[in-house]
Amino acid sequence: MPRRPLMQQEVTEVAVPQDQTAEMYQSVSDTVSDFATIQRKKDLANIKTYMSQANADMLEFTNQWRTSNNEDPTNQDALGKLQAGYDKILTQYGQKVGMFGKGDWLQVGERLKAQYRSDNINWGERQTVINAENGINGGIEKDMQIYRQLGQTFDYDKLKGSYMLSREVLAKFGSQTIGKAKTDKLLQDYQSDSLSIFIYGATEKDPDKAEMLLNQEKVRADIGDPGKIDTLRRYIARQRELKKQGVELAMNEAEDKLTDSYLQDKLDIMGVDRALNAKQIRPEFAKQMREALLSDKAPGAMTDDKEFVKAVDMMFTPKKKLEDINNYLLAKRAEGKLSDDDALVIKTFASNIGRKGYTKFKIGWELMPEKVHKNIWEKLTWYWREHEGNENQAIVSMWKEYTGLVGQGKSPQDALNDVIARRKIIAGYKIGDLKTFFGRPFKCTGFYDDGEPNFEPVR
């Protein structure tokens, strides 16, 4: 029987290792060192990213802070809030930095804050100068407003004392903030401007008194600038004319209202006297109105057609004003030559067309020029006298009919066509009449501006 080989047992002797603790710790230390190096590099890379983000946030926060504090850039409470805001931003990003970058992040944060602190100091200095300049300019502007109001008292001596004191204060304040050179430049025209604006204020109150002030040699010497003096004289002349026009306009309106009241039987002598005593109306108008009110011919007066035509002619005479027309109407009422109704027709139309070329009668979206009504008045008078003879009664009737149609909203030309067509006064034709030309029938459809009939072929 075959025999199996027996397994042989090998004994391997293991030598007891020598003490290697130092080498082992060195290896661990090297491993940790390598890890720390890698982590530090990572933290440093993150620091660069976080620094950029923090810088952007700090910049935005700084701009907002400056906008809110530009009037007082050195306010300590505001500066404390600014630094607290920086710390909050840096802390927010510092929490994201690893332990191996904490020290570096603190250094970066301090450098950022130092940079912003330096920039804010420089900005604060510049802004303080700007604020000082604005303060001086604002002070000058407020002073000028005061001097303009002071001009309405015409107290020149008070003005001089006021502007000298104010200039002294502004000069002292400016020298201590923006420097003497800049301050002197800002204030170089202060005296001249103060006196000029004083005269402007005086002119607005009373141009004549302002001119008396400007005619004083000491006043002109204090102003100094011939150009400013010439401008003031021109302004005085302008304001005098405006004041005159304003007084005349107010009187025109007052007289116009009184005329309306009289024609509607709503005025008495006492009302005229009150308006005259208040200098709201002219003496000549008051006299004319009294005569009309006291006339025993005015009640029940019948219109003299010739006087009616004259009154309408006055309405279209360039040199005649509304007050002239009112006075004429009152005179004819006192003479018993115009009825209330007819006088009111002329008065109303004259007021509506005004004296500046445009009427208050609205036709569609346009205002019809005065000359349109003037031309139509001339056509009406010419048409009647040409075809029917010089009969003022018919002309008056036609004009009253025309003004009534315009007042109802018809255009001047349409109103004219209606008036003419109803009277058949143009070469015997009226709208709708037929006439034969060259063997063909034509129908009158209206009238041209020159009064000739317009015929169109019958289709």
Image (cartoon, rainbow, N blue to C red):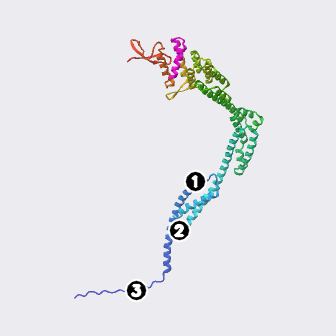
- Kind of residue at disc 3: Glu
> What element does badge 2 sit on?
helix
Mark 1 to mark 3: distance in Å?
81 Å
Residue 100's mark? 2
- For residue 72: magenta? no
Which is the main secondary structure of the residues drawn in magenta? helix
**SS state under label 1:** helix
* Label ID, residue 13: 3
Disc on the earlier residue, 1 or 3: 3
Q: As drawn, is 152 to the left or to the right of 39?
A: right
Residue topped by disc 1: 64
Q: Earlier in the sequence, mark 1 or mark 2?
A: 1
Q: Taking 28 as reference, is 80 above or below it?
A: above
Magenta segment boundaries in residue numbering: 379-404
382 or 89: nearer the viewer: 382
Label 1 is placed on what type of residue? Gln
Q: Earlier in the sequence, mark 2 or mark 3?
A: 3
